[in-house]
Image (cartoon, rainbow, N blue to C red):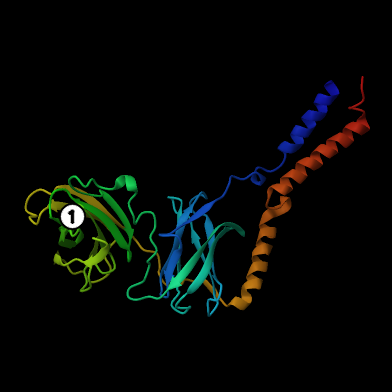
Amino acid sequence: MTRFRVALLACILCAATVPAGVIAAEESATIVHEGDTLTLHQSTGQTVSGETTLPEGTTLSIRMRSTGDTSPAFLRVSETTVTEHGTFEAHFDMSEGPKTGTFEVTVSHDGDSLTKTEGKIVPCDSNCTDVTVTEHDTPDEGMQPSPDRVDMVSVVEVTQTRTARIPVTFGDKEKVTITIGSEEVNYKYVATLRDRDDDGRAVVLFDTENAGTNRTTATVLDDGGEYPVDAREEWQIPSLIDPGIYDMDLYAGTNTSSNPATIGSLAILEAPPANPTPTETKVTETTTQQTTNTAASMRKSTGGVFGGDSAGLAAIIGGCVLGVVGIGALLGLFRSA
């Protein structure tokens, strides 16, 4: 029995010598989009975003490839890094591609695919830059204000050039007035909203790219449609609205000289470059096989001596066991007493 324990201990020690990197934590990613399918437009600054379990600073490869009868066929590759919040965002210039079609997006790390999703391209009717919504653009269901009083979401985050969604409620009022900004940030927006369908709810869409310009800054989702909002007051700014924290006040009715019914904050985050960068690669469909072969080579080279999957680990441990058994047989460890 003692000899058997010696052999078993040798096997355990052998397995323990396998590098810790072989047994890695599960890596996963999710592409975030509205609706059933990721939708992009034939325009610059189209965004693919999502979440991942990988640590901050990890480099991800985002690969977009045309599918079906999409013409002209295309392949786009962009690299991005994981943020401190476990999110990622990649930008693509789709202005030179097809007006309509379908595609597949794959998120990879070190040559290994983490997730993929199907998408479609639709024509761009107006301003289509950065249309993809991230988790911060739409407040969680648990953060929705109560329709029983004049209220709004307390904190809304949005990236420059994108549109913030600000749910508001009317309580028993027909109208409410929202203000965004102040003298401290050199920008102020004031508008009165009307409850069009008497359900006590509406969503303000605040376009950060149009803020402070002659274009319409805000629209409202209400009564099954989207309607432009006429600003009562808006300060003009010479360029894109600065990133920062902007005060939001919501008043019952149209009078803004009294105390607001509720207050909140609009956090505008700095936008990454919307145009293609040197990390974004455009190739034609004829190079797809070459790209696939390159990815396969990456998997082989990054796998190291032990390979990139659990089969390598099993083979190592199995070899250790056979080696110990062989040594035990030679030394007579397994002979009966």
User: Residue 16 placed where, x, y %?
Assistant: 71, 36
Extreme residue in the top direction: 337
Q: Mark 1 points at which residue?
A: 198
**Residue for point 45% across, 72% down:** 121
- Is 316 displayed left or right of 56 in the figure? right
- Is 127 displayed left or right of 65 in the figure? left
Dividing the picture into quarters, in which one does residue 87 lie? bottom left
- Say which of 301 and 196 sits in front: 196
Q: Is residue 316 above or below residue 250?
A: above
Q: Is residue 280 visible?
A: no
- Is 37 displayed left or right of 138 in the figure? right
**Residue for point 82% across, 29% down:** 7
Q: In this view, does 183 lie above or below 92?
A: above
Q: Is residue 223 above or below residue 103?
A: above
- Say which of 326 and 255 sits in front: 255
Disc 1, SS: loop
User: Residue 178 placed where, x, y %?
Assistant: 17, 57
**Residue for point 26% across, 54% down:** 167
